[in-house]
Amino acid sequence: MGKGIFGRLRRGLKKTRERIASSLARVFTGRGRIDEEMLEELEATFLQADMGVKVTARLIDCVREFHKSEKGLGREGLIERLEGEVASVLGSNSASLNVSCSPPTVILVVGVNGTGKTTTIAKLAKMLQDEGKKVLLAACDTFRAAAIDQLSILAEQAGVSIVRHKHGADAAAVAYDAVEAALARGMDYLIVDTAGRLHTKVNLMEEVKKVQRVIAKKIPGAPHEVLLVLDATTGQNALQQAKMFHEALGLTGIVMAKLDGTAKGGILLAIKQELDIPIKFVGVGEGLDDLEPFVPSDFAGALFES
Amino acid sequence: MFESLSGRLQSVFRKIAGYGRLSESNIAEAVREVRLALLEADVNYKVVKDFIEKVKEQAIGQETLRGVLPGQQLIKIVHEELVNLMGVSARELDLSSSPAVIMLVGLQGSGKTTTAAKLARRIKKKGRQPLLVPCDTKRAAALEQLVSLGRQLGEAVYEPGSDRDAVSIAARSVVFAEDHSLDTVILDTAGRLHIDEELMEELRAMKSRLSPREILLVADAMTGQDAVNIASAFDKALDITGAILTKLDGDTRGGAALSIKAVTGKPIKLVGIGEKIDDLELFHPDRMASRILGMGDVVTLVEKAQEAIDQEEAERLEQKMRKHGLDLEDYLNQLHSLRKMGSLESVLNMMPGLNQLKGVSLGEKELKRVEAMIQSMTPGERRNPHLLDGSRRKRVARGSGTSVQEINRLLKGFEQARKMMKRMGKFQKGMMKMGGSAWQS
Ligand SMILES: Nc1nc2c(ncn2[C@@H]2O[C@H](COP(=O)(O)OP(=O)(O)OP(=O)(O)O)[C@@H](O)[C@H]2O)c(=O)[nH]1
Ligand SMILES: Nc1nc2c(ncn2[C@@H]2O[C@H](COP(=O)(O)OP(=O)(O)OP(=O)(O)O)[C@@H](O)[C@H]2O)c(=O)[nH]1
Ligand SMILES: [Mg+2]
Ligand SMILES: [Mg+2]
């Protein structure tokens, strides 16, 4: 697993791991007991990876427990234990896209502004297209300047078709037309791009709910997938985003974009722990091939491997 | 869910309130709580650490303020230090050349293009002639986005033609601006990772070619711990002149603001508060401090209390309380102190914990009546309210222009307060210093 995302992730996360290791080394050398100050430092190390207070507390509890129950546990052993704990927070199965037994499978993509929704859609489209599927995109971001142009250009790059209206049109109307077109043209997938919206804006959340309703009305059971795109650089607010979008739409999956930077994306643990929404993909670049499936055990391994 | 920062600090406050007085060890616990609170607000861990050191230094050296709870005092110091760290006042852009070149840089999707348009509008309002320049030749429809925004604004957008080189587009746009008497050139650059050496080099080249007046890092207010890496990398490469924080219209605490300022030393100049073209404001460090801290009200309270409450009086009262319990005379004195602090209701509202006390509904008008009633009592009656039988109550009611029912209510409330104060134990001492505002429960 040295290549691809987790190779990259590991490199990125190596520093974190090293910091954790050095903190742990100090915890376990010398006095042979856990010193509160050291635990605080360890806690800060986890927090620095954007893991959030709750998950951090859980991990710290683990350190205490492991230390109490297994006195002989060395540094390596402890890291292994923590890794196991992180993996358990993230869940055990790697999640793939939901597929409808009667096509089209409709995927609604949502998130706050600028996280990478439109790019992720193009990546998904390319991935499915490469699998030989017929993919249609719906340009339901009718609000942001040139959002429709952006999706059109990306659709062309991915080699898929698109349904679009004019700038300023009703997003739900675009969705309606797109579903009709997908049905008429026998598409395997319809992927719906939506405008970026802060989860705190009630009217905008209502708008995207309406898009969902329109889709559900035309195809019972659709959208089969409601994906929230998060930006890996985001801190604790990502949890709030996940909560609010989940409440409004019932999320079926999360994509974390921009994991190719130096941000650790540790908030995913908090989100998984609190909301139990499957994390499906990670974005690792701006290119259309820079999308990788999310594998919990690998993610945990990348955090803690020696 | 995480507790809100404000909620967290309220609990810190409650803990400290119990200490009664400030000592090195109980500060240690309190600052640890504050540290966690700041981390929850996404302030970078190292920044928090430095910050806490500073606050500790200050707090431990200080004498306990008169009439203020130690916890409140700590929060005031925290707030002051937050403001100090982020700069004391709002900073305008430096546009003292013609054409003045402004370069917007940052990570992907942080809000550069939108902010470019917002800046054009802002600058236009100040009587300048902006030119928007699309230097992003990378992202799909980046040019169209800026062109569309320019059209919306009615501002000039430079047309790069077939040029795909960001530096040469920027350079030619400045010549264009000079030729067309446009005095402010706003360069919208492509989003890039701070670790992308090649693209960072492109920005360096652009800078050395154009000597921009302002190089502004456009950063997402929701950024987490990584804000320090991002900001320091851009600053190292470009020696930025400041930052613009976008998407502050959400519910993020915005700790990134503190991180960015702390690691670069560069001011945050403007903030984006919406997707619309007018949604750009000057950055106010004090407001940001309150947002990150969530306890601006306590800070105000401490300031007021510092002026109003007399330490000796509080101590005298405290001693007396311990010996004899509370009497109506003290009650009146404390009401006077409170009056000096401003509207009683506002004072109560400012106090964490107290604003949740049930039955606290002493308005300004009621306070005046209470004052009148107590003033109509003899000193003996004030010290020993049991003396107030039916006929004395009638006399007091007449004297104060109130009714016997009101007197009854006052005495009942006072009796409850007295009982409550006994129960409150340690907490009571603190409240006495605050001016006895918990007595109305
Ligand atoms: N480095 C990196 N950049 C990405 C990734 N995904 C998207 N981006 C970039 O992030 C920026 C924003 O991406 P978009 O796809 O336009 O984001 P969006 O969520 O659709 O934005 P709005 O529609 O404006 O809310 C673009 O510059 C993308 O190229 C990723 O995985 N890594
Ligand atoms: N709510 C809110 N949204 C904002 C704000 N500023 C920008 N946005 C939105 O954030 C998203 C990204 O903005 P852009 O201006 O395209 O970002 P960018 O930095 O130019 O992106 P790239 O060029 O892809 O790197 C868009 O959906 C904007 O409408 C703000 O202050 N508040
Ligand atoms: Mg988009
Ligand atoms: Mg842009």
Image (cartoon, coloured by chain):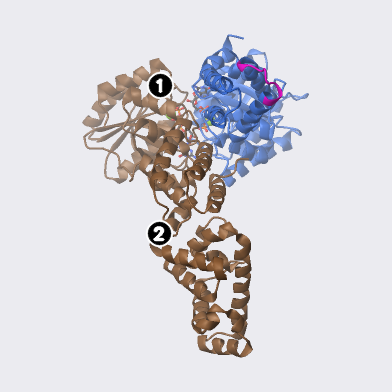
Chain colours: A blue, B brown
**Disc 1 with disc 2 on a shared chain:** yes
The image's mark for residue B306 is 2
Q: Is residue B281 visible?
A: no
The percent position of residue B249, horizontal first and vertical second, equals 49, 43
Residue at image point 50% right, 36% down: B42
Which comes sooner in the sequence, label 1 or label 2?
A: 1
Q: CA distance from mark 1 to mark 2?
A: 58 Å
Q: Nearer the viewer, residue A124 or A14?
A: A14
Magenta stretch bounds: A68-75
Query: Position of A26 compared to A86: left or right?
Result: left
- The quarter in which the C terminus of chain B is drawn is bottom right
Question: Eyeballing the image, is A248 above or below A3?
Answer: below
Question: Eyeballing the image, is B65 above or below B197?
Answer: below
The percent position of residue B317, horizontal first and vertical second, equals 49, 67
Query: Position of B3 compared to B281: left or right?
Result: right
Secondary structure type for disc 2 = helix
